[in-house]
Image (spheres, grey):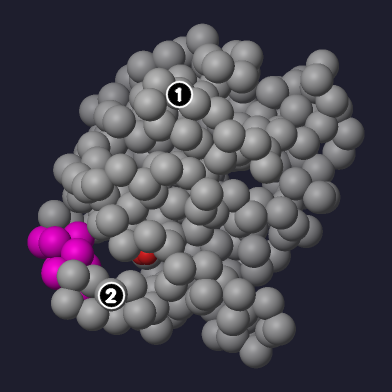
């Protein structure tokens, strides 16, 4: 783990792989930290320089008071990549991380040469839905949304695994201001128009049982970019990189190979 000061805000990040490896960036979802990618990074082939980070208000990164805007989250990723010398990367974004990917690709084509849009969409939920979620948290803390979130994150069989409690704990220990700030950023975001204008290789990944961004929603966004492709990982929810890391890493590896990154 290392900290990068991007101008008054410290972001926690980690880089795996050789300095001369092909650059890859992973951006995780609401209520998770960079450990979301542990099992996938461990399965990726040699020759990749893989950066992952905790977005503001999450993990070990600083947690300024909310609200946050999506533009700010995109700028954080941009500043981090500039500071660490990541250019022309393949950007893998899951959920809100996939929204950051879309915003960054539209803003800085020099930073993003291909994208994996995993369990995400140009627009996730409605403003009312996010306002309701924030109100629930303000009243009862993140614990108040924990059970419902687990139902969206995971397919039923995962509940029986020894790994399950740690993921629920990761959600519940997310700083409340950071979680709320990111809800507000998602509530105000719609990438339909900017994403339709993107021309770069895109792989979409969806989970068949995803209760937050079901496959048809992911498909609608992925289809905005000509030549893109969607893969559905059966028997997984919103976090297929956790539930089926072998399948997830195999999809990334195949896509990275097609881009000449490995
Ligand atoms: O909590 C959820 O519903 C899942 C989710 C939506 C956006 C995100 O990043 O995670």
Query: If you read the primary sequence from the N terminus, does the residue marked by circle 1 or circle 2 appear first?
Result: 1
> In screen coordinates, is 24 left or right of 167?
right
93 vs 197, nearest the viewer:
93
Label for residue 141? 2
Q: Residues within 10 Å of mark 2 (few under 14, many from 20)?
A: some
x then y, percent, for residue 133: 21, 68
Give the quarter of the image for residue 46: top right
- Where is ligand 1, by quadrant? bottom left
**Going 22% across and 47% down the picture, which residue do you hit?**
66
170 vs 86, nearest the viewer:
170
Q: Which region shows up in magenta?
A: 128-136
- Residue 139 part of the magenta segment: no
Task: State which quarter of the image contains the C terminus.
Answer: top right
* Tag 1–tag 2 contact (CB < 8 Å): no
Give the residue furthest to the front.
8
Vertical placement of 118 versus 141: above or below?
A: above
**Going 29% across and 81% down the picture, which residue do you hit?**
144
Vertical placement of 242 versus 77: above or below?
A: below
**Going 39% across and 74% down the picture, which residue do you hit?**
149
x then y, percent, for residue 7: 40, 21
- Give the residue pinned by disc 1: 6
Give the residue furthest to the right.
46
Residue 262 makes an appearance in the image: no
**Going 62% across and 27% down the picture, which residue do you hit?**
90
Q: Cβ of disc 2 within 8 Å of ligand 1?
A: no
Task: State which quarter of the image contains the N terminus.
Answer: top right
Give the quarter of the image for residue 127: bottom left
């Amino acid at each position: 783990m290392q900290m990068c000061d991007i101008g008054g805000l410290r972001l926690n990040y980690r880089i795996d792989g050789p300095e001369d490896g092909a650059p890859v960036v992973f951006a995780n979802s609401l209520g998770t930290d960079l450990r979301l990618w542990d099992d996938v990074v461990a399965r990726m082939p040699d020759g990749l320089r893989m950066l992952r980070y905790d977005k503001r208000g999450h993990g070990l990164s600083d947690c300024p008071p909310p609200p946050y805007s999506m533009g700010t989250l995109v700028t954080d990723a941009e500043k981090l990549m500039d500071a660490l010398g990541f250019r022309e990367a393949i950007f893998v974004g899951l959920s809100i991380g996939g929204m950051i990917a879309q915003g960054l690709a539209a803003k800085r084509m020099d930073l993003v040469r291909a994208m994996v849009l995993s369990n995400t969409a140009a627009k996730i939920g409605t403003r009312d839905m996010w306002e309701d979620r924030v109100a629930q948290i303000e009243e009862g803390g993140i614990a108040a949304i924990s059970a419902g979130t687990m139902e969206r994150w995971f397919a039923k069989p995962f509940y029986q695994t020894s790994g399950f409690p740690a993921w629920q704990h990761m959600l519940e220990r997310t700083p409340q201001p950071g979680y709320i700030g990111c809800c507000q950023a998602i509530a105000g975001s719609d990438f339909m128009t900017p994403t339709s204008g993107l021309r770069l290789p895109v792989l979409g990944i969806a989970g068949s049982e995803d209760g937050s961004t079901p496959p048809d929603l992911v498909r609608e966004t992925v289809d905005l970019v000509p030549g893109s492709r969607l893969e559905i990982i059966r028997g997984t929810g919103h976090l297929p990189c956790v539930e089926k890391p072998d399948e997830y890493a195999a999809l990334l590896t195949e896509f990275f190979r097609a881009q000449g990154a490995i």
